[in-house]
Image: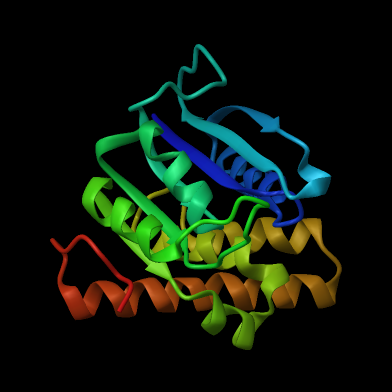
């Protein structure tokens, strides 16, 4: 069983990411159950997607402390979802900041993640935006997760699903983002070694 939680805000492609992950798992012969929680998404509210992949799945929702991997597209949303992560689970977070009306300190959010996540990889949104565009940030994080062995499928499996879901132009863009995320994660792991916690510098 693999439990994946995807967190972001409205407009970041959280639901699309969950559907790509679900479709790829299904294509690989796994059972999949999932659900979305969307709060005022059109106003930049939190969006949370649960994806559970395996042979036998009782519930679509991931309980706190049971997520094998959390993909977070924004720093504050990453901190909000820490309670779902297993003690040895992997969080892949983007350092992008989308300030709510109340505002928050990004450095404080990073400190929380570094002190609380079992394994943490932080990817730079600027690098993703320059290479792939911010619209493909969600797919880049999926590529990073694939590079870490977080999913029961490969980058190649995901590429085949992307080809079936998008036209040629968007397929090319998304596959490029997928491979770029894979490259970022592999580079971070190589710098720190297989047992290191972070991949953000």
Q: Is residue 148 left or right of residue 30?
A: left
The quarter holding residue 38 reads top right
> How far across and how far down the image is residue 39, in percent?
72, 34
Residue 153 in view here: yes
- Quarter of the rendering occupied by the C terminus: bottom left
Residue at 50% across, 39% down: 5
Closer-to-camera residue (39/167): 39
> How far across and how far down the image is residue 14, in percent?
66, 49
- Quarter of the rendering occupied by the N terminus: top left
Most extreme residue toward the top is 58
Residue at 67% across, 30% down: 37
Closer-to-camera residue (9/106): 106
Identify whether 8 is placed above or below 139. Answer: above
Identify whether 86 is placed above or below 103. Answer: above
Residue 152 in view here: no
Identify whether 122 is placed above or below 39. Answer: below
Closer-to-camera residue (18/54): 18
> How far across and how far down the image is residue 181, in percent?
49, 72
């Amino acid at each position: 069983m693999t439990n994946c939680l995807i967190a972001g805000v409205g407009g970041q492609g959280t639901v699309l990411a969950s559907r790509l992950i679900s479709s790829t798992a299904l294509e690989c012969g796994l059972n999949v159950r999932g659900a979305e929680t969307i709060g005022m998404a059109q106003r930049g509210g939190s969006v949370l997607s649960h994806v559970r992949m395996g042979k036998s799945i009782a519930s679509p929702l991931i309980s706190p402390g049971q997520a094998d991997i959390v993909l977070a597209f924004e720093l504050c949303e990453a901190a909000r979802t820490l309670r779902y992560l297993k003690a040895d689970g992997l969080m892949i977070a983007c350092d992008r900041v989308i300030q709510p009306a109340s505002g928050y300190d990004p450095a404080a959010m990073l400190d929380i993640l570094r002190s609380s996540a079992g394994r943490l990889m932080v990817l730079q949104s600027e690098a993703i935006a320059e290479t792939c565009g911010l619209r493909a940030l969600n797919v880049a994080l999926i590529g990073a997760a694939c590079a870490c062995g977080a999913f029961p499928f490969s980058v190649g499996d995901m590429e085949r699903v992307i080809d079936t879901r998008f036209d040629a132009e968007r397929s090319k863009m998304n596959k490029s983002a997928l491979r770029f995320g894979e490259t970022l994660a592999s580079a971070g792991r190589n710098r720190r070694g297989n047992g290191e916690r972070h991949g953000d510098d």
